[in-house]
Image (cartoon, grey):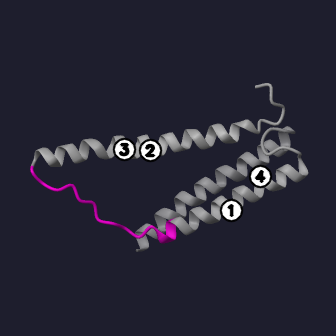
Amino acid sequence: MQDPTADNSIGNVTGSNSVNVFLGLGLSWFPAAVYWEFNGEDFEVDAGSLGPSVAVFCGCALACIALLLVRRWVVGAELGGPVFFARVSSAFLVSLWIMYIVLSVIIEESA
């Protein structure tokens, strides 16, 4: 709150996402595994191809890192700063998120 550039929030977001992924995956798969174990069957999930989705994610991640670097050099802070740059950056990051979801769905359905 007292950091004028809000740079510490990057660490908070990274930690929060890690916890969400590990708990989200673990808590959702655990009941299914227990259910199938009690019914005497194996809990098997067909493996899909993650390659294209990972490639899209890596592209979006590089674009995000590029944005943070540009903001550091132009605005002087990765997050926060003037309202205009904050809103443009927010819109760009949301568009990356939407693009990742749409491309991942299109790639999965075409495979």
Q: Nearer the viewer, residue 92 or 18?
A: 18
At which x and y percent is residue 26?
36, 44
Mark 2 Cα-neighbour bin, 10 Å: few <14, some 14–19, many ≥20: few
Q: Which mark is residue 62?
A: 1
Q: Position of residue 73 (x, y in %)?
A: 88, 53
Marks 1 and 4, how far apart in space? 10 Å
Q: Which residue is mark 4?
A: 68
Which label was assigned to residue 26? 3
Q: Earlier in the sequence, mark 2 or mark 4?
A: 2
Disc 3 vs disc 2: Cβ atoms closer than 8 Å? yes
**Is 85 left or right of 47, judged from the image as shown?**
right
- Magenta span: 40-53
Please identify the quadrant where the C terminus is shown: bottom left
CA separation, marks 2 and 1? 23 Å
On the image, the x and y values in percent for residue 97 come to 60, 53
Residue furthest bottom in the image: 111
Q: Nearer the viewer, mark 2 or mark 1?
A: 2
Q: Is residue 47 magenta?
A: yes
- C-alpha gap between disc 3 and disc 4: 31 Å
**Cα distance between the residues tagged 3 and 1:** 28 Å
Helix or strand or loop: what does disc 3 sit on? Answer: helix
Q: Amino acid at mark 4?
A: Leu
Q: Is residue 87 magenta?
A: no
Helix, strand or loop under label 2: helix
Between label 2 and label 4, give the one nearer the viewer: 2
